[in-house]
Amino acid sequence: MEHGRQKWTYEYKYRRGGKTLCCLYAKGSCLGFMVILGKDERAKFEEIRSALSPAVCRKYDEADTYHDGKWVMFEPADSTEFDDYMKILSIKRKPNRK
């Protein structure tokens, strides 16, 4: 773990195939989860938008867009949006080969 950015105490980058899949942040009793979606990934997000909760879509819409993608930070309070997070991660991750 590394010391997290700005207001977070810890940061853990989860990498898969040489690319960062997501970042997990922690401080005290709070957890953050960030996904950076590039141009193609943002188009895929729009395709599945109707299957996601309004709260997740709102976080996406409010997120800042930089030259390398849209940085979406979630701060889950419970597991109600877990399925939505998995759908977003499936955009970033290629399926396993069989």
Image: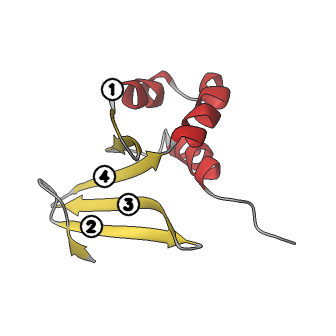
Q: Are marks 4 and 1 in contact (CB under 8 Å)?
A: no
Q: Residue at x 74, y 61 (%)?
A: 95
Q: Are marks 4 and 2 in contact (CB under 8 Å)?
A: no
What amino acid type should be assigned to the residue bearing mark 4? Gly
Q: Residue at x 58, y 49 (%)?
A: 86
Residues under labels 1 and 3: Cα distance?
Answer: 18 Å
Please indicate whether residue 86 sits to the left or right of residue 27 in the image.
Answer: right
- Which mark, by number, is residue 32? 4
What amino acid type should be assigned to the residue bearing mark 3? Cys
Residue pointed to by mark 1: 62
- Which mark, by number, is residue 96? none
What amino acid type should be assigned to the residue bearing mark 1? Glu
Mark with earlier residue (3, 4): 3
> Which color scheme does this rendered protein use?
secondary structure
Mark with earlier residue (1, 3): 3
Q: Are marks 1 and 3 in contact (CB under 8 Å)?
A: no
What amino acid type should be assigned to the residue bearing mark 2? Glu
Callout 4: SS: strand
Residues under labels 2 and 1: Cα distance?
Answer: 22 Å
Instruction: Kindly indicate the quadrant of the structure image that contains residue 56.
Output: top left
| Quarter of the figure that contains the N terminus | bottom left
**Coordinates of residue 20 in the picture (x, y in percent):** 46, 64
